Amino acid sequence: MIAFERLTVAYPGGTTAVDDVTLAIAPGSFVALVGRSGSGKSTLLKTVKRLISPTAGRVLVDGRPVDAEPAPLLRRRIGYVFQGIGLFPHMTVAENIAVPLRLDGRVDPERVAALLDLVDLPQEVATRRPDALSGGQRQRVGVARALATEAKLLLMDEPFGALDPMTRDALGQAVRTLHDRLGLTTLMVTHDMAEALLLATRVLVMAKGRIVADTTPAAL
Ligand code: ATP
Ligand code: MG
């Protein structure tokens, strides 16, 4: 469950990236957030994980304001796939996946193996560096890392951005299957309305910092 209450985010310099957004995201839903470049999608996502502080209003996760607990505790409950994935090039795949687990000092090879299985990656990639993977495999590593802490809330920012259409479809379906199987609440930013309609249970359209449409694929 995520709730945005009259949320406004203005960056220093004057851009109002998010403009008075009120929105509730129900547990178990798969929400796609679409909109043009610069409409505020990434900014909205980042406030959930407290990577950005709002100028006004607040964000609640599971009914609690995100600033009510220490940020590391909040962040463990939220899986996040960054725009551009952001794998560390000097680390192996296994080390990349274990980054969120290291916060409390645990790197469990069995857990890494289970996460590779979960996202359908062969175990051999564990010891490789990200630059020795295909683009689609890298995105899968990003998803595995997001799920490393057994977070029930998954935020994805253009997770399939740079992929060819077939790989994109396959990965999208894989993530939707994971979402259903793990009972996740998922908020995914995408430029691609067709992808949003295919994968999501609810589609939000953002323009100039506001939610300008809120619909379900079934309604269209
Ligand atoms: P894209 O689809 O290109 O990723 P977006 O919808 O994710 O775009 P945001 O990254 O949220 O858009 O940016 C919203 C607005 O805020 C834009 O006008 C952008 O230039 C501005 N902005 C984003 N990050 C910063 C920052 N760190 N400092 C100042 N302005 C910023
Ligand atoms: Mg963005």
Image (cartoon, grey):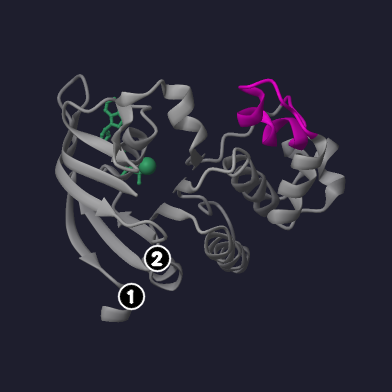
Mark 2 lies on residue: 196
Residue toward you, 76 or 208: 76
Is the residue marked by circle 1 packed among few (<14), some (14-19), or many (20+) residues within 10 Å? Answer: some
Tell me the number on the disc at residue 37: none
Taking the image as drawn, is residue 128 in sight?
A: no
Q: Is-magenta flag for residue 97? A: yes
What residue sits 76% from the left and 54% below the top? 117
Q: Earlier in the sequence, mark 2 or mark 1?
A: 2
| Region in magenta | 90-108
The foreground one among 146 and 124 is 146
Q: Position of residue 162 (x, y in %)?
A: 55, 52
**Vertical position of residue 145 compared to residue 206: above or below:** above
Can you see residue 201? yes
Kind of residue sitting beneath label 2:
Ala
Circle 2: element type: helix
Residue at 57 percent across and 42 percent down: it is 146
How would you rate the neighbour count of disc 2 (Cα within 10 Å): few for under 14, some for 14-19, many for 20 or more?
many
Residue 217 is marked as: 1
Up-down relation of residue 194 to residue 204 (above or below) = below
Foreground residue among 96 and 191: 96
- Picture quarter containing residue 60? top left
